[in-house]
Image: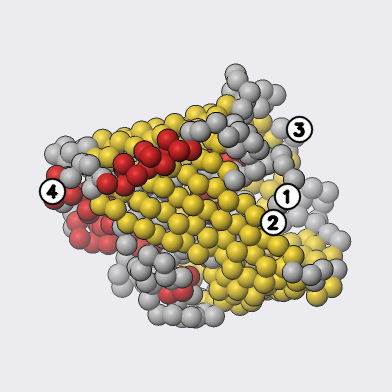
Amino acid sequence: MMVYWHGMSNTRVMQQAFGRDAQAQKQSSLAGMVAVFIALLASPCWASDADALSLADQASEPAVARSDWQIFTEGMLGHVNQRAPLDDIRIGRASVDVLLDTAINPEWRFTLANRVDWLGQGGQDEVVNTFKEGYVSWQASPNAALDLGRVNLRSGVALGYNPTDYFKVGALRSVVSIAPSSLRENRLGVGMLRGQWVWEGGAVNAVFAPKLADQRQSAAFSPDWGASNSVSRYLLTSSVQLLPGFAPQVLLLGEQGQSPQVGMNASILAGDALTLYAEYSGGRSATLLPAAPVTWHSRLAAGGTYTFANNLSLSLEYHYDGAALNQSQWRDLWRNPADYWAYRSAVFNAQSLPTQQAAMSFITWRDAGLKALDLNWMLRRDLVDQSWQSWLEARYHFERMDWALQWQYQNGAPGSQYGALPQRHSVQAVVKYFF
């Protein structure tokens, strides 16, 4: 599987990028296909925008009547500048995303979500299908429901790092954006049986996700049960409203061969425009280094969002992972490149932090001086090695189409989280069409 370039901690791409053969081919056949794709999308068929999946999309509220079907296509062309002695490369992508959520009868529903990405990078092309969801739901009573099948169950209140999002591990097949909302949306769900019971002021959920396969599969259209269900797990969650506007959630995860993990999510409206939130997970576990001892580790994300009167929102977050490496461990690991990249590959698979502390700011400005124009800016900083990453997007919404321009930059010392990446910066033009 070739994972699409995203400038984060994708060691497979990093290692490929060091190969001179890959640099020699700058012209991707997919790039031409994407160019034609974008040209076709550029025909004037404006209607209504009904979806939002990226950071920009997160800032855009759907304003149309609900439909059982949601389908969009997306094309992208981009250019990546790499650190010397690597050459620059061109990248391209064409995607089709389908969501069906329909009622079979008053008690039963069926949900299906699937995405196909045709990826091109430096002369290499690949097709990756992500079977995100496929399950049936039974509304057994007004207060109780059951789901059976593959469900993309997302937990957590933070934006950039979610310690309680336990089912994110191994869930990424094709990374097309570093936007946190895209990483949570465009991933494999987990095969599970889920029961829900709600009452006035509270709710309880119980999930059982059995082991379905031993290893993940790289075939383009594989459902990849080995990635999502390689071990048996259970998850219990409960939330109760303690005060008006305050209903914390507690979680208990059990996993085959691992100690239980406990978690909590809480958020509160601290004023007319300020929301504060925190997310915690803790339990006995090993680090992602080989032969690491098992001990108690805590993980935390905390922050807040302030919304100004001009539709600009500012979010600031602090991230901590006690199972990640401290400064001396991180510096020592860089001295052994094989171990260093193996560790980063494991971190990427777990969607965790490579070092113990990080910070993130995210600014979104809707109708930024022009109606239907959204600006989004994300800045991540590793507080252990002081490297940083910046992502900026301008997105204009037509009725059935989005045009977006994205710029990404990363900087740091050799061996740092962002300075070790071969890619320095990139520019991407994106067109998204909603049917």
- Of the residues under marks 2 and 4, which one precedes in the sequence? 4
Q: Position of residue 182 (x, y in %)?
A: 51, 49
Q: Residue at x 48, y 38 (%)?
A: 41
| Circle 3 or circle 2, nearest the eye | 2
Circle 4 is placed at which residue position? 20
Circle 2 is placed at which residue position? 68
Circle 1 is placed at which residue position? 66
Number of numbered discs on residues = 4
The Cα atoms of the two marked residues, 1 and 2, are separated by 7 Å
- Of the residues under marks 3 and 2, which one precedes in the sequence? 2
Q: Residues within 10 Å of mark 1 (few under 14, many from 20)?
A: few
The Cα atoms of the two marked residues, 4 and 1, are separated by 50 Å
Q: Is the residue under label 2 in contact with that under label 1 (CB below 8 Å)? A: no
Q: Is residue 399 above or below residue 16?
A: above
Q: Tell me the amino acid under the disc marked 1.
A: Arg
Q: Position of residue 321 (x, y in %)?
A: 46, 55
Q: Residues within 10 Å of mark 2 (few under 14, many from 20)?
A: few
Q: Is residue 261 left or right of residue 117?
A: right
Q: Residue at x 47, y 44 (%)?
A: 74
Q: Is the residue under label 4 in contact with that under label 2 (CB below 8 Å)? A: no
Q: Tell me the amino acid under the disc marked 4.
A: Arg
| Circle 2 or circle 4, nearest the eye | 2
The Cα atoms of the two marked residues, 1 and 3, are separated by 29 Å
Q: Is residue 148 above or below residue 17?
A: below
Q: Is residue 106 above or below residue 182?
A: below
Numbered disc 3: secondary structure: loop
Numbered disc 1: secondary structure: loop
Q: Which mark is residue 272?
A: 3
Q: Is residue 11 left or right of residue 261?
A: left
